[in-house]
Image: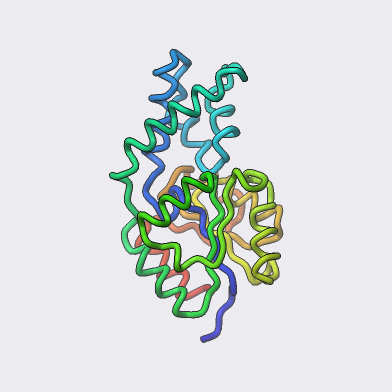
Amino acid sequence: MQRRFELLVFDWDGTLMDSASAIIASIQASCRDLGLPVPEHERAAHVIGLGLKDALTYAVPELPLADYGKLAERYRCHYLARDPDIELFPGMRDMLVELKNRGHLLAVATGKSRVGLDRVLEATQLKQYFDSTRCADETHSKPHPAMLQELMQELLVEPEATLMIGDTAHDLQMALSAGVPALAVSYGAHPRDSLTELNPLACIDQPQDLASWLEKNA
């Protein structure tokens, strides 16, 4: 079967997994625990996709450097408490199986830590479908292009044969910097306008429409 893109790189939170609200709530709760200013929903949502240090630094700019570890610890505590209730968006498992059967290489580029991604890949039993993964604590955080560059180098795929799929401006900016086409999804963390202004190939508004677009266009 003819494919336009050999490699499909997925963001995780807000793209494959319905975790954005849990991340936002965990950031806000951890700030309350430490008596810090609680970021509004929009500010907390903006950091999704970044590495944890970059995310907390942006979400709580008043945070003293010495207190970063305390806030990160509280965030992990709150997120892990919510973790058992977080699920994949409907249809994502079947979509990944079908894409793999079509012969695509599949990868993940995420702001999660390696420990966090490995845990969720095991819990969802999706690890077998991905040819490679990159996490924010292994290389530069988004929107730096390193994750995509490293994945393409490892899997021997050129930028024009690679597609980045994500729900944040960080994902799309990373793709632009790496010279990689991008597909936006607006059902995750960032508002549609902030995605479309970065000129993705398309913007998918409902999780159930992602598989259909990829089937027709990837």
Q: How many circles with numbers are drawn on the protein? A: 0
On the question of residue 183 being in view, the answer is: no
Q: Is 5 situated above or below 125?
A: below
Residue that sits furthest to the bottom in the current view: 1
Q: What percent of the width, then of the height, locates residue 48?
A: 50, 40
Identified at 57% across, 60% down, the residue is 164
Question: Is 195 on the left-hand or right-hand side of 204?
Answer: right
Residue that sits furthest to the left in the current view: 85
On the question of residue 176 being in view, the answer is: yes
Q: Is 157 situated above or below 72?
A: below
Q: What percent of the width, then of the height, locates residue 189?
A: 45, 43
Q: What percent of the width, then of the height, locates residue 193?
A: 52, 45
1 and 105: which is toward the camera: 105
89 and 151: which is toward the camera: 151
Q: Is 66 situated above or below 197?
A: above
Identified at 39% across, 36% down, the residue is 79
Residue that sits furthest to the top in the current view: 35
Identified at 47% across, 80% down, the residue is 102
186 and 162: which is toward the camera: 162
Identified at 58% across, 54% down, the residue is 134
Q: Quadrant of residue 160?
A: bottom right
Q: What percent of the width, then of the height, locates residue 14?
A: 43, 48
Q: What sort of colour scheme is used for the picture? A: rainbow
